[in-house]
Image (cartoon, rainbow, N blue to C red):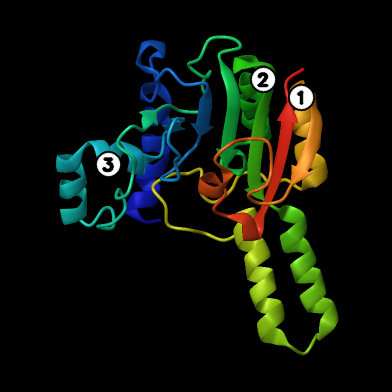
């Protein structure tokens, strides 16, 4: 096990307790991008708790870790200046019914099912009646169908079948990866049925599958950047 993998659980636990946004520090906007990474749009409150996001705020520590070859040189680059450090496994910092829109992309699969359920419940709480949530996750059904199609089309085409198998294993988190966060590889996966069920269990209604860049949530041309492998769903708080 590499040093970065050994440090991962320690860093993750430390961020869980320290990455907590103050309600007073929140921008006066009615929309939140939770688990934003470096994909942001103007007028949104952007939350993330990646170790890279923290390192982006602490240049001296990042430089030292790079010099010691603990992290690669480009690990903490490209993060937005207005990022709010907050761990989405903790309660969201907004008051009840404070937001009109919630967007979250490629975050839910990094959480265990119970953690994902709590996050969706928090999204329900902070949304206004009539407010909308858009959840984007890797599409388990898509990767499974790709593998089955490749294996069924030509069993002698080992390269194609192997590529499809590796894609499925990667997205499900079955292959080892080098990451400072133990939330990589993925902890859970969703298809259209299980994601709809999770949204329904959180209290959402009018659950609709959408295409990339299409929907009622604003700024999708900027936010939906992983359309080719993703499942997109929108739902409403009644």
Query: Residue at 60% of width from left, 61% of height from top?
Result: 170
Give residue 124's mark. 2
Q: Among all residues in the image, which is located at the extreme bottom?
A: 156
What separation in Å lies between label 1 and label 3 (alpha carbons)?
Answer: 35 Å
Q: Within 10 angstroms of label 1, few (less than 14), some, or many (20 or more) residues?
A: many
Q: Say above or below: 96 vs 124.
A: above
Q: Is residue 174 visible?
A: no
User: Along the horizontal axis of the image, is 161 left or right of 37?
Assistant: right
What separation in Å lies between label 2 and label 3 (alpha carbons)?
Answer: 30 Å
Give residue 56's mark. 3
What separation in Å lies between label 2 and label 1 (alpha carbons)?
Answer: 7 Å
Q: Within 10 angstroms of label 2, few (less than 14), some, or many (20 or more) residues?
A: many
Query: Which element carries disc 2, helix, strand or loop?
Result: helix
Which badge, 2 or 3, is on the more N-terminal residue? 3
Residue 88, given in percent of the width and then of the height, sits at 51, 28
Residue 47, given in percent of the width and then of the height, sits at 44, 31
User: Along the horizontal axis of the image, is 44 left or right of 135?
Assistant: left
Give residue 171's mark. none
Considering the image in quadrants, where does the N terminus appear? bottom left
In the image shown, does 200 or 13 lie closer to the viewer?
Answer: 200
Residue 135, given in percent of the width and then of the height, sits at 65, 38
């Amino acid at each position: 096990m590499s040093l970065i993998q050994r440090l991962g659980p320690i860093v993750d636990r430390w961020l869980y307790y320290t990455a907590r946004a103050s309600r007073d520090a929140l921008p006066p906007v009615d929309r939140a991008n939770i688990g934003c990474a470096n994909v942001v749009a103007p007028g949104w409150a952007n939350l993330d708790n990646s170790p890279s996001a923290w390192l982006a705020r602490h240049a001296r520590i990042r430089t030292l870790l790079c010099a010691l070859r603990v992290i690669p040189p480009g690990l903490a680059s490209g993060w937005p200046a207005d990022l709010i450090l907050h761990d989405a496994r903790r309660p969201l910092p907004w008051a009840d019914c404070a937001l009109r829109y919630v967007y979250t992309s490629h975050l839910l699969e990094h959480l265990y099912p119970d953690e994902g359920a709590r996050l969706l419940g928090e999204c329900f709480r902070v949304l206004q009646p009539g407010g909308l949530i858009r959840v984007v996750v890797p599409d388990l059904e898509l990767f499974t169908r790709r593998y089955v199609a490749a294996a069924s089309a030509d069993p002698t085409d080992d390269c194609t079948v192997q590529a499809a198998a590796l894609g499925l294993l990667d997205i499900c988190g079955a292959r080892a990866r080098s990451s400072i966060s133990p939330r990589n590889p993925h902890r859970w996966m969703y298809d259209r049925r299980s994601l709809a069920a999770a949204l329904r269990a959180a209290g959402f209604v009018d659950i609709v599958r959408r295409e990339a860049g299409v929907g009622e949530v604003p700024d999708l041309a900027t936010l939906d950047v992983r359309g080719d492998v993703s499942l997109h769903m929108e739902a409403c708080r009644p």
